[in-house]
Image (cartoon, grey):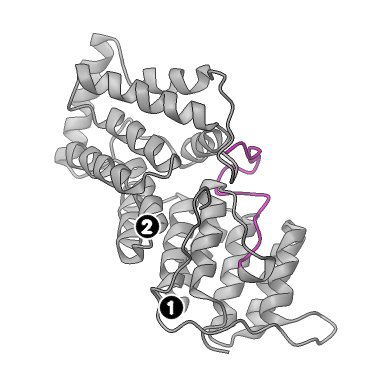
């Protein structure tokens, strides 16, 4: 049962999990959309732009406040800059970086915003950069806005600039990793998630993201290791259970695959689709066998208005 799922499977799944994007993919072509996207246990509801591009035109002050928080009072800024410089010199994580829990909460909040919110985020970051052209946090905010607006190539430039200015930021590496996944640059994505983990080693979502990147490169056994670490950090992480089960099924560990996919199904009933697809039903029905893909690079190509 080698190469049991299509190469597009992992990338599509991570788009749903990392970005809550709308797709028109058939159920049999992708793992399920989890009730626990890569966020804190109380995941936010999906509020991303839909496949038609519809979005609210109302201004959301959450975005403005988040970007304006980049600014600081002079005294705070001096202290913060000194601490950041010391950490950078010692190759430690930026002391102003969010904890893993706070980062998950911020990601969940950002996923719930609308197209109008992302455009506001972009405009606010532009304004900050005009006054302070070497502000790494503003570059990061602008990069995230561009990525959410699906301008991945432009986002990549801003992510790289943010990292150049502050190379010990786990948030910048994590988000650039997601952006690389969207661009099907899986080796680069894996490297970015590894760097995010260097500076924030308890980030379950970075382990999950790196696991998905490895799946895309047919590295199923190393992917299992990363999904296992994500599960160790959060035993209720349904997505990690599901993807580890799929990875196990790809190198004929069907007992382990069934165990994981049954656990995922208990945490999220929608994961039963993957249980049926990759290991068959409990009544002995054979699993479905998707068509093989010639190369690891034959990924999903989104239509306009879709991820």
Q: From this viewpoint, which residue is outermost toward the left?
A: 89
Q: Which residue is located at x 59 percent, y 49 percent?
A: 22
Quadrant in which residue 290 is drawn: bottom right
Q: Main secondary structure of the magenta part?
A: loop
Please rate how many residues cluster around mark 1, counting C-alpha atoms within 10 Å: few if below 14, some from 14 to 19, many from 20: some
Q: Which residue is located at x 23 percent, y 10 percent?
A: 74
Are circles 1 and 2 on residues that touch, CB within 8 Å? Answer: no
Please rate how many residues cluster around mark 2, counting C-alpha atoms within 10 Å: few if below 14, some from 14 to 19, many from 20: some
Residue 53 image point, x, y percent = 55, 39
Residue 271 image point, x, y percent = 71, 64
Q: Exactly how many numbered labels are in the figure? A: 2
Query: Image quadrant for the N terminus?
Result: bottom right
Q: Which residue is located at x 46 percent, y 38 percent?
A: 103
Circle 1: element type: loop
Residue 187 image point, x, y percent = 32, 66
Circle 2: element type: loop
Lower position in the chain sequence, tag 1 or tag 2: 2
Examine the structure image and report whether residue 264 is included in the region drawn in magenta. Answer: no
Q: From this viewpoint, which residue is outermost toward the right?
A: 283
**Part of the protein shown in magenta:** 30-48
Alpha carbon of mark 1 to alpha carbon of mark 2: how far? 17 Å
Quadrant in which residue 244 is drawn: bottom right
Q: Which residue is mark 2?
A: 183
Q: Which residue is mark 1?
A: 218
Please say if 59 is above or below 27.
above
- Residue 268 circle label: none
Quadrant in which residue 88 is drawn: top left
Residue 51 image point, x, y percent = 59, 46
């Amino acid at each position: 049962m080698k190469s049991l799922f299509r190469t597009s499977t992992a990338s599509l799944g991570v788009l749903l999990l990392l970005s809550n994007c709308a797709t028109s993919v058939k159920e049999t072509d992708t793992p399920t959309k989890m009730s626990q996207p890569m966020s804190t246990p109380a995941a936010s509801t999906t509020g991303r732009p839909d496949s038609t591009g519809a979005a609210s035109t109302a201004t959301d002050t959450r975005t403005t406040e988040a970007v304006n928080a980049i600014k600081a009072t002079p005294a705070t800024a001096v202290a913060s800059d000194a601490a950041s410089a010391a950490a950078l010199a010692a190759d430690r994580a930026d002391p102003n970086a969010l904890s893993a829990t706070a980062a998950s909460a911020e990601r969940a909040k950002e996923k719930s915003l609308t197209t109008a919110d992302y455009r506001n985020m972009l405009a606010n970051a532009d304004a900050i950069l005009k006054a302070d052209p070497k502000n790494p946090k503003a570059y990061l905010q602008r990069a995230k806005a561009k990525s959410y607006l699906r301008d991945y190539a432009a986002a990549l430039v801003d992510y790289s600039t943010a990292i150049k200015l502050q190379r010990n930021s786990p948030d910048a590496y994590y988000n650039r990793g997601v952006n690389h996944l969207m661009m099907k640059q899986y080796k680069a994505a894996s490297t970015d998630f590894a760097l995010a983990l260097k500076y924030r080693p308890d980030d379950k979502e970075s382990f999950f993201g790196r696991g998905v990147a490895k799946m895309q490169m047919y590295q199923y056994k190393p992917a299992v290791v990363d999904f296992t670490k994500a599960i160790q950090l959060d035993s209720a992480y349904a997505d990690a259970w599901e993807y580890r089960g799929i990875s196990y099924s790809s190198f004929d560990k069907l007992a382990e695959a069934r165990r994981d996919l049954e656990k995922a199904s208990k945490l999220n009933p929608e994961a039963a689709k993957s249980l049926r697809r990759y290991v068959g039903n409990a009544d002995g029905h054979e699993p479905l066998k998707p068509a093989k893909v010639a190369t690891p690079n034959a990924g999903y190509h989104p239509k306009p208005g879709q991820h």
